Image (tube, rainbow, N blue to C red):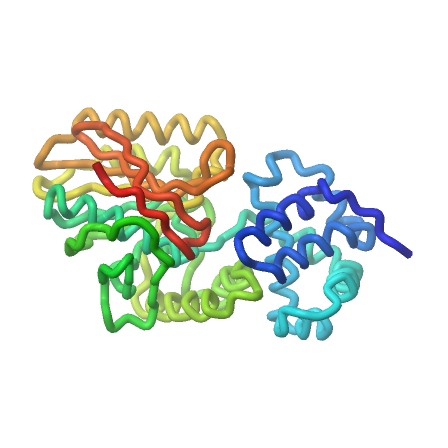
Amino acid sequence: MTAAASPTGPLGRHAAAVRAMGSRFVADVLAAGERQLWRAPRTAALIAGWPGDAAADALAMRFHAALHALARRGADAALAALFHDAAGDVDRGVGAAMAAHDAFIADWMRHVPQTNEVGRTGAIMAALMVLATRRALPVALRELGASAGLNLLLARYAHHLGGVAAGDPASPVRVAPRWTGTAPPAAPVTIASARGVDLRPLDVRDDEACERLMAHVWADEPARAQRLEAALRIARADPPQLARGDIADWLPAQLGEPQPAGEWRVVVHSMALQYCDARARAAVDHAFATAGARADAARPLARIGFEWTAARDAVHLSLTTWPDGVTEHLATCHAYGAWVDWHGAR
């Protein structure tokens, strides 16, 4: 039987974007998934009836992660071999797995993706270095949509950013994106405290939670997987401080706490706001505006965003600082931080 899949479905559409990002195998998996949907009626129905924005909700990446999880578990020997080699008869392997594990795939796809890609910390560290050149103050770091909290540990990673080193040079986690543009300012960053929030925070001491993170790494990028495993080992030794909650409630409470003089209060969010509805995004903006109005030179506030543009055609690293309230577009970045095109600060 021949599949008659539409190339304009969410899996097929995202395959082109993934191929442009350099992942041929994952693109092939998504394209094969589009063609083979007829073999997985539950998964097909879930995708066809998806109530939200398939791109913003990362539906294609949920599909890839479900198959990757099956492969990593050894639940399907043929699929495990296909993903291990990142080559082979993709339609045959993906189609057979979809037919055999339709319920598992559909159930997995209902969960919000938890990527916690530590490669993004390179761009975030560069933004923190910009802040350090303006006021050399310790940082109270807060993260929205923190997942397992790995980005909160960025000071424990070795960063190589356009010829500038930062973080812990002895760290087993090396973050070295391809860098274009001028180098970021070389300034030491001191993290005084770090806390984050997530609707469903992942406990790094939970093997199943860690496996879910690993499944979201693209199957043909073993270096990313190795880096994530190293970051998880660091986190397990000293778990990050995370809260379970809605950012629309948590952020105003955090920004409402008294801020000591002589400390940056920095809130970061990376690929988090796309999962928020309009109400939550408005609450976040209002919380920043309210706190920004109280900020002064002794108690400065900053917002670092690593997010898709509204058109989802680029990922921008943005920095807003108070008391001046100015927003800067520091860089355009690869979605997982593999490259950074640095535009520089004002």
Position above or below: 46 against 281: below
Q: Quadrant of the N terminus?
A: bottom right
Residue ID at (49%, 68%)? 207
Q: Is residue 82 left or right of residue 307?
A: right
* Residue 90 image offset from top left, x and y in percent: 73, 64
* Residue 45 image offset from top left, x and y in percent: 76, 43
Position above or below: 266 against 37: above
* Residue 335 image offset from top left, x and y in percent: 46, 49
Q: Is residue 218 left or right of residue 158?
A: right
Q: Is residue 187 left or right of residue 79?
A: left
> Which is nearer the eye, 272 or 162?
162
Can you tell which quarter of the image residue 346 is in?
Answer: top left
* Residue 330 image offset from top left, x and y in percent: 30, 41
Residue ID at (11%, 43%)? 135
Count of all numbered marks drawn on residues in the image: 0
> Which is nearer the eye, 211 or 68?
68
Residue ID at (47%, 35%)? 276
Q: Is residue 90 left or right of residue 108?
A: right
Can you tell which quarter of the image residue 343 is in?
Answer: top left
Residue ID at (63%, 58%)? 66
Q: Outermost residue toward the right?
A: 1
